[in-house]
Structure formats: structure tokens, C-alpha cells
Amino acid sequence: MIPERKFLVSPGPHLWKGLSVSKIMYLVVIALMFPTGAAIYFFGYYALSVLGVSVGTAVLTEYICKRIRNKAFVMDGSAVITGILLGLILPPTMPLWMVALGSIFSISIVKEAFGGLGHNIFNPALGARAFMSISFPAEMTTWVLPTYFGADAVTSATPLSESFVWPADKYSLYQAMFFGNRAGSLGETSALLILIGGSLLLGLRIINWRIPGVYIGMVALLSFALGEDPLFHILAGGLMLGAFFMATDYVTSPLTNRGKIIFSVALGVLTVIIRRFGGMPEGVCFSILFGNAITPLIDRYTKVRPYGLVKKKVESAG
Amino acid sequence: MGVRLKKKGTPYGVKVPENKLTAKKPIELAPLPEKAIIPLHQNIGAPCEAVVKKGDKVLTGQKIGDSDKYVNAPVHATISGEISGTTMVVNPPTAQLVEALIVTSDGADEWVKLEPPKNPEDLSVKEILVRVRDAGLVGLGGAAFPTHVKLSPPKDCRIDTVILNGCECEPYITSDHRVMLEYGEKVLSGLNIIKKVLSPDNTYIAIEDNKEDAIDHMEELIVAMGLKDDFKIAPLKSKYPMGAEKILTKMILGREVPIGGLPLHVGVVVHNVSTAKAIHDAVVEGKPFVERVVTVTGAVKNPKNLLVRFGTPLRSLIDYCGGIDGEANEVVLGGPMMGLSQFDLDFPLIKGTNGIIIKESTPIREQDCISCGRCIEVCPMYLMPTLLARYAKAGRYNECQEGYIDDCFECGACAYTCPANIPLVQYIKVAKRELAKRAAKK
């Protein structure tokens, strides 16, 4: 018998794939655990405190912002990602209060002030990094060699800076850069672990291969054209981390595949220009921020051609 | 050349869990209803007027509603008995109230005298069309478009291809599948009639590869019936919404139907396999259209494929399948992707309904779009659903139109895949309705 009950009427489709926003976000968090692991392995307990402060402050800030804006707070994982990413792109000796300030800035100004997840123009972590580069120029350019657990910090240049000298042969430099035994931001040093995390996201179809593929390819191509070492440029700086985890941010990258390619080409060109001709040694952060800024423009001009679109025949006169 | 063409697939659309629980269950005869509720409007065209009045005795197959409009299909009594009154029911596709006649059964199921043609081969095209119309045939894939209209393309449209649609890409539903397996000869006979009327150069039978048994069976039948040179089978990789007319036209012929147009504008007519079977019944056997195969599935104790008389209330069909299982609280008519919810279980089965799905439904919260672009990737019409929904939400309907919203046939692939749970199709429907209102004002 049919029980007497009220029946629901809901709009179709009556099936849902079940891949929710928070599932996507937590999958990204899992993928980020690889570069995070590298950060902690190379830079010890202090890396852990930077990441802890950054994530904790980000989530707390999001909660407060939602309360102020009178919106429901959902632990959708996006603030966790911002927190981890911000931690990973900071120098290893960053004072914790600055980390906290940057984290507050990323969530409150770059994200929530624009309307929260889905409405922000810039990648929150990169926005905060730009803010911190201007506010704390000295701390943001102090680099140390990996300290592991307990070794004393030894100041060193990053491979991209002009004063960088590598005492041994080229092959060992590539090796150090690939595995992560070099100076740099917390999470950017180990290309290997970024690749593992990135491949996970590619394999799960969370990110579109076009962005990291075209971006990194473009950097390699252009640096080669300018007479530089392409492999060095791929492994140096924050390119890998930026290409896999930040340029691929859904909200701040173009919607269509064509748009994504244009976006990535622009990113590659800018990164190489800043690295080669700019006043700063590294340009990934500002390239991606610039790309974010032109994303709405790209979206406007890269609409897809719909099925069955036929050009209207010009009506002949008479 | 063999009967079977090379299998084709598409990168668009979505892979949906098929849940074809009833694929192996033979069609069962559903018990006749004690009371049949026959809505007078069961096609996409004009509604019918009642041609009988309260108290009249009617026989099974007797015409009880008709119209002088061209785009219309008459309705028939589906059981014998007495017209005991009228009622109003909500017609799900239009959400409008329509009048329905109630036939109270006399238990005899006495049929009108059928008048099959002496020699079906000798029927002229005109005679075939009259028989199709008088039988009340409509397309059985869901849209319920009067079949005789679809069989009479405008003179300036030369039809070079007929596609018989056995894709059944909606999950759960197996009615077309079973019709192909159990009434294969009738389907091919119906297709022969379609071929005679439209005289196309090529005729294809499109079947998704999740119905390998139906592909094999139809292939054998084509060979056995000596139709090898006439019909080809086009196997397609299962992907929703493969069975949509415009997608089939593109898949099989590579032709795109112009926006706002129909497949016939590119020389193609698509008919459903169940419609072909019904055409056979109407033309060769002279039988009015009073029953169809329906899949009753989902959260019922015994999911079944049933041959049901129109007008049978949903309640008795669900009861016949053992009743609702667990806490299920939603009844969907049609497939789960494009079907519409029905809250009233006294609603009758109508011509366009191919499935009844019982499911448990929990309201889900819509989140903000994160611009992941998944809806754009899956859209089979290459539209940008998230933008359309965004414009619709903001009331910017002109921009919806500029985004070719009219091209959308509301398959729901976008909303199925949306991680933010945005009811994209619903927003699009609202915008379309607003645009239609504006157009009507002008």
C-alpha cells in the first residue's frame, strides 16, 4: 500500500552527480598536503607554525566576516585552501604576526569584501602576498636554505635572484631544485611534490590540464627564445606551485577552454617578462594577479559557439 | 555492407548511473483500471473537445475527444463503460489545469470493431496519415507531438533521412528497450510505414550500447525480415542526452539543426521506437492508441515494465508494483533527468509518460557559482548554462537571449554536474517563459 504522505515537487534533473563544492575543495586540500609535507620537511617546525597560523586565521576570519555579513558560515574548505596556499608562498622566516595579518587580509579584503567564494576577482592568497610584499619588503625577500628540523637558518639567495651562485655542476642544481633542497618560499621548493599533488588533481579532473600545461609550456618556450635555460625557469621560483594550484583557481580563471588557453599564454608571457626584464626576481604572483584581472574580459570574448548557429543570410534588396 | 554501422560517441553530455533495474523484466499487462481518467489534452498541440457526454456508454477504443485543429491528436476511451463525469487535472508539462473525462468500467473491456486494412501494403500515404491521426498517435519519447504532423513535413523540406530513436538515454527507464526486444517485428513494420510515407534515402535505427541485446535482436530481425538494404543500425556509446533529436542528427549525420529549427529543416525526421510500434498497431491492425509500455521503478518493491491503458491512476500502478519502499517522497513522471514531479497520485497515466520513478528526495541548498565551467563542458548544445542562469537570476533576460537560451532543450546535464547545486535548468525555464511573455506582448 502507498503510505499517506506529502509528496515533494522539485525541479529537475532529479539526479545529481554528487561532486559538491566542498568535496572539490577538500580534494584540493589533500593534493596540497604534498607540497605542505615538503615545506615541513625542508623548513621544520617553524613551517608548521606558519601554516597553522595562516589556516587558523583564515578560517576564523571567514567565520567573523560571514557573521558580520549575516550569511551562513559553511566549512566548505575554501578558506583552508587559502590559508595553506598563503603559508606555502611565504618565506620560511616570516614573523607569525605578519602571517596572521596577511591571512586576515586575504579572506576579509580579497575574498569576502567582494562577496565571498565565487565572487572574488583575485586569488585571495596571491592578493595577500602582494599586500605583504609591499607592506613588509624586507621580510618578504629574506630567504634561507632548508633548515630541516633544528639546523640554523643560513641566509641564501633564491635561484632566480641575481646574486645566486651554485657551487657545483648544472645537473646537481636541477636535482636540488627538483627535490626541493634550495632556498625559496615554504612550499615552492620541491617541484616533485607539487607535481604529485598536481597530478592527483589532474587525474581526478578537478583541474583542467590546459592551465598548468600552457602556462609552464609558455614559460619554457619564451625563456628558450630569450636564450635562457628553460628547465631552470620551470623549476625555479613559484611557477610550479602557481601553475598547478593558483592559476587553476576556478573563480579567478576563465570559464571556457579557449579562455583558459589565452589566460595561460598571458601568464607565461608576463612571468618571463617580469623575470627577465622586471625589477623583481620572480613574477608568478603578479602574473597570476594580472591574469585574474583580465579574466572577465577574456570571458566576454571567448563565448562558445552554440550548436546550430547559422549566420543570418543577408537579405537581398527588393 | 553490414547492417550495423561503426559505433560513435560524443565528448559532450554526462555519464549517468544507469540504474536500469527493469532491463531484464518482460513487459507485464497491468490490470485494467476501474475508473480511467482521460485528460482531453494529451499532445503538444491543441486540446480536444469532448464528443461524448455524461452517461454515454463507451467501448474501448471509441473516440471521446477530438478537435478540428491540425496539430492535435484525438483521445479514446481506454476501457469500456460509462462516462461518469469530468474532473480537472494538472497537466505536468504545461502546469495548466486541463479537463479530463472519467470512464467507469463495466468490467467487460468490450472493444469497438477494429477495421484493419485488407492489404496494408496497398494503403496510400494519405490513408496511412488518416489512420495515424484517427488512432490518436503522438510521439512517445516524451514531447507528445502529434505523429501525423511529424509524418507530413512541409513541401519545401525534403526528408532524406529517418532516424528511429531507440537510445533511451534517460537512466532507469527501460520501456523502449523492452519494446524493441518484445515487439521488434512491429517496430520494424512501423518503421516501414514511416519509410513509405517519407521516402527517405537512408533509415537508421539508433541504439545506445548499454542495450547490446536490443542491438543484436534488431539486427537479426532486419536480416530475417529481408530489410538489410533498407535499414541500418547505428550503435552509439551511452551518454546522456544521446537520444535528443538534435544530438542524434549531429551524431549520425554530422548535421546541426539551426537554432529554433527542427531536424526536418536539415532533412531529418526522428521517431521513437515505441511510436513506430504504435504506428504499426494503428495502421496494420487498425487499433486506436489506448495503451503503452511504462517503466515503474525506483523505490517500489517490485520495479516492472507494464503495458498500461491510458487513464490508469498512478496510485494503482505503484500499488501493482508492491507499493512505495522506505521513505521515498517524490514521484517523477518521465526519466529522472527531464521528468517532472507529480504530487497527486490520482493523476492518470497519459500518452507522453514513459516512466514513473519513485525516489527519496532531500532539498539541497543552492550555493554560489564557483565558475568551474563544468556545465559548459557538458552542455550538448555548447551553451554556457552558468551565464544564462546568472542573467536569469538578475532578470537580464535580453542577455539570456543573446546567449542563445532558445537553443537549450533543458536536458539537465548542466545541473546534474554542477557542484554548487544550482538548479540551472529551472532558471533557464523561468527566463524562457519571461521571454515568451515579452514576445507575446509585442
Image (spheres, grey):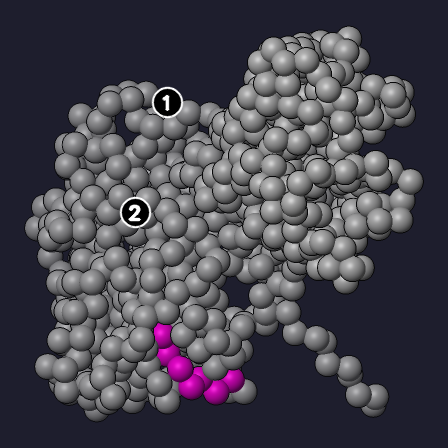
> Which quadrant holds residue A46?
top right
B160 magenta-colored: yes
Q: Identify the residue shown where x is 58% and y is 59%.
A: B382
Per the image, the residue denoted by label 2 is: B18
Amino acid of disc 1: Lys
Q: Identify the residue shown where x is 62% and y is 63%.
A: A306
Where residue B151 appears, as percent x and y from the top left, is: 39, 77
B432 magenta-colored: no
Q: Is residue A30 visible?
A: yes
Per the image, the residue denoted by label 1 is: A6
Q: Which residues are magenta?
A: B157-163
Q: Identify the residue shown where x is 38% and y is 61%.
A: B243
Q: Is residue B340 left or right of residue B54?
A: right
Query: Height in image: A286 above or below B411?
Result: above
Q: Residue furthest left?
A: B108
Q: Is residue B410 left or right of residue A17?
A: right
Where residue B352 appears, as percent x and y from the top left, is: 35, 54
Is residue A86 or residue A65 the one in the foreground?
A: A86
